[in-house]
Amino acid sequence: MTQEIIQIDGVSKSFGKADRQVAALNEVSLAFRDGEFAVLIGPSGCGKSTLLYLIAGFESPTTGEIRLDGKKIQKPGPDRGFVFQDYALFPWKTVLGNVMFGLLRNGYSHRDAKTVAMEHIRMVHLQGFERAFPHTLSGGMKQRVGIARALAYNPKVLLMDEPFGALDAQTRKLMQQEMVSIWEATQKTVVFVTHSVIEAVYLADRVVVMTAHPGSVKGIIDVDVPRPRQYTEEHYLHIRQDVLALLEDEVAKSAKALA
Amino acid sequence: MMNRRIFTQDAAARWRTRFVAALQFVLPFLILGVLWELIVRTGVVSQTSLPPPSRIACKFWELCVGDHLLWRHLARSMYRLSIGYALAMGSGLLFGSLLAMNRILGDMFSPILSLLISVPTIAWVPVFLITMGLGDRTVIAAVFLGGFFAITYNTIRGIEMVDVSQVRAARTMGARGPKLFTAVLLPASSVSVLTGLRLGIGYSWRALVGGEMLSAMIQWGIGKMIYQARFWNDIVVMFVGLLVIGLTGFLLDRLLIRWLERVTVERWGMVTER
C-alpha cells in the first residue's frame, strides 16, 4: 500500500456544446494506491461513472490529467480492464471466446490464450460453460464472464462500473464475496463504482464519497475492517454509518436539484 | 423404460407440430388453387386471359421433366444473379462500413445515397443497354444495383447501432483498426446486415427478371422465357414463369438467408428464434 498507481490531477469534465455545457466533474484530485480496493460512491449524477470512464480513456478530461503508472491516459488500452454494468459481452463468441479476446489481441498464441482463459474461467467458477453462448447464461454468470474477460490479459488495474447493479440481492451478495477472493488472489488495483453503501463498505479498503452537480470528492473513508468481513459486524456497521452520514446531505441536495 | 416413453411422446408431439405447420403452409395455396380452377372452369374468367392451375402445372411439368428448358432458363438466371449479388454484397458491405465509420464520408455521401435509392433499378437498364451492351453485363449490372442500396443502407444502420459498451470493451482489450472492425463491429451489426442481405437478394432477383426482358441479345433466363412467350401468345408459359420466379425468390430466402440467420444471429441469441 505504498505506491500510487493512478493519479487524478485537477480533473474537470463537462459535456455538451459551448453555450449549454453541463459540468459533470469539478476539480477532482485523487490517487489510487497499487493493489488497493477503492470504491467510488455518490448520489446519482455525481459523476462517479464519468470519472471511471476518464480513467478507462473512453472520454477525455476537459481540464487536468490522469496518469496511470506515471503515464498520461489518452485512450483505452490493455493496461486496464473494464467491467460493465450491462456486461457488454460479445454475443457471437462463447464464454471461452470472450475471455480469450483480450489475450489474442495482446500477443498470446491461440494455445496459450486458451490455457490462460481456462484458468480465469475456473477462477470465476464457470468451468463446464466454456462453450456456452452468453445469451444462455444468467445475469450473475454473465458478469463472471465479464470479470474473467477483464482480468485474463493481466491489466494493471481493474475498473468496475456498477458491475452488480443489475443482479438480484442474493446473487449480488455472492458476487461481492467472490469479488473479494478474486481481488485477494490477483492482487489487482480495483476501482469500483457503486451506489450501494453496503457493497462499498463490504468491498473497499477506501471509500471515496463524491458530491453531486458537479461531482467532486467530499471525503475518503478508510475501511480498516479485516477480511473476511461480516455484514453484521459492529465496526463494519459503524463505518457504514460514517459513509451514510457523508452521503445523506449529498443525496438530499441532489434530490432538491432535480425537483 | 420411463425415459424411452417420454422420448417417443416427444417425438410424436414433434411430428404433430410439424404436420400442423406443413398443413398451415399448404392449405392457403390449395384453397387458392381450387378457387382459381373453379373460376376458370365455370367460365367466369376466360381461359385465354387466365389459364387454370391444372394447365400451368402440366406445362410446368413438361418444361421441367420433358425438355428441361426450364432448367436452362433458370440456370442462366442463377448465374447472373450470383455474380451480380456477390458484387452487391461485397461492395455494399465495404461501402456501407466506410460510410458508417467515417463521419466525413458519411455526411458527404448520404444525400447521394438517398437520392439514388429512390430510382427504380429498372429505370437504369436502358442506360446500361447503351453503355454495357445488350447481353449479360447489363443484366448483372441491374442485379448489382438492385441489391447494392439495401445492403449498403442496412450495413450503415447496423454499424451505427452497435452497442457502445461492446466497442469500448474491445478497445480496452487492445482491438483497433481493421481488427476492431472484423472482430467486433461486423458481427455486432449482423442482425441489420442480414436484413440488408435479405432485402438485397429480393431486389436483385426482381431486377434480374426486368433486366432479362429488356436485354435483346439474351436468349436464356427466366425473365426472357416470359417475354418470349408473348410472341407465341403462350399465356400458360408466362404463368409458369411467374410461378417459378415466386418460388425461386422464396427458396433463396428460405435456404440461403434463413440458413445464414440460423448459424449466426439465432445461434448467438441476438434475435428471437423462429
Image: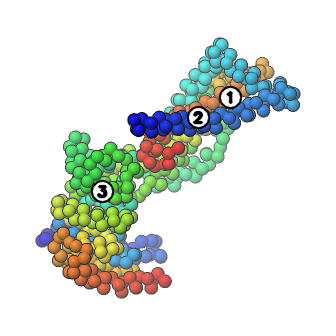
Q: Can residue A9 be seen in the rendering of this structure?
A: no
Residue B164 appears left or right of B116: left
Residue B181 is situated, as x and y percent measured from the top left of the image, at: 39, 47
Residue that carries the numbered disc 2 in the rendered image:
B19
Q: Please state the chain letter of the residue tagged with numbered disc 2 in the rendered image.
A: B
Q: Are marks 3 and 1 on the same chain?
A: no
The CA span between labels 3 and 1 is: 54 Å
Q: Is residue A11 above or below residue B41?
A: below
Q: Residue at x 71, y 22 (%)?
A: B57
Q: Nearer the viewer, mark 3 or mark 1?
A: 3
Residue B75 x %, y %: 58, 22
Could you tell me which chain the residue with mark 1 belongs to? B
Judge left or right: residue B132 versus residue B98.
Answer: right
Of residues B196 and A35, the one nearer the viewer is: A35
Identity, as a three-letter code, of the amino acid under mark 2? Phe
Please state the horizontal and vertical placement of residue A149, each as a whole percent of the image. 28, 54
Percent position of residue A91, x then y: 39, 49
- Disc 3 crowd rating (10 Å Cα; few below 14, some 14-19, many 20+) is many
Name, please, the residue furthest toward the front.
B1
Say above or below: B133 vs A38. Answer: above
The secondary element bearing badge 1 is classed as helix
Disc 1 target residue: B243
**Residue where numbered disc 3 is placed:** A144
Between disc 2 and disc 1, whose residue precedes? 2
**Residue sitting at 28 percent across and 46 percent down?**
A128
Query: In the depicted view, which residue is nearer to us: A47 or B244?
Result: B244
The amino acid type of the residue labelled 1 equals Leu
In the figure, residue B168 lies in which quadrant?
Answer: bottom left
- Extreme residue in the top direction: B67
Camera-near label (2 vs 1) is 2
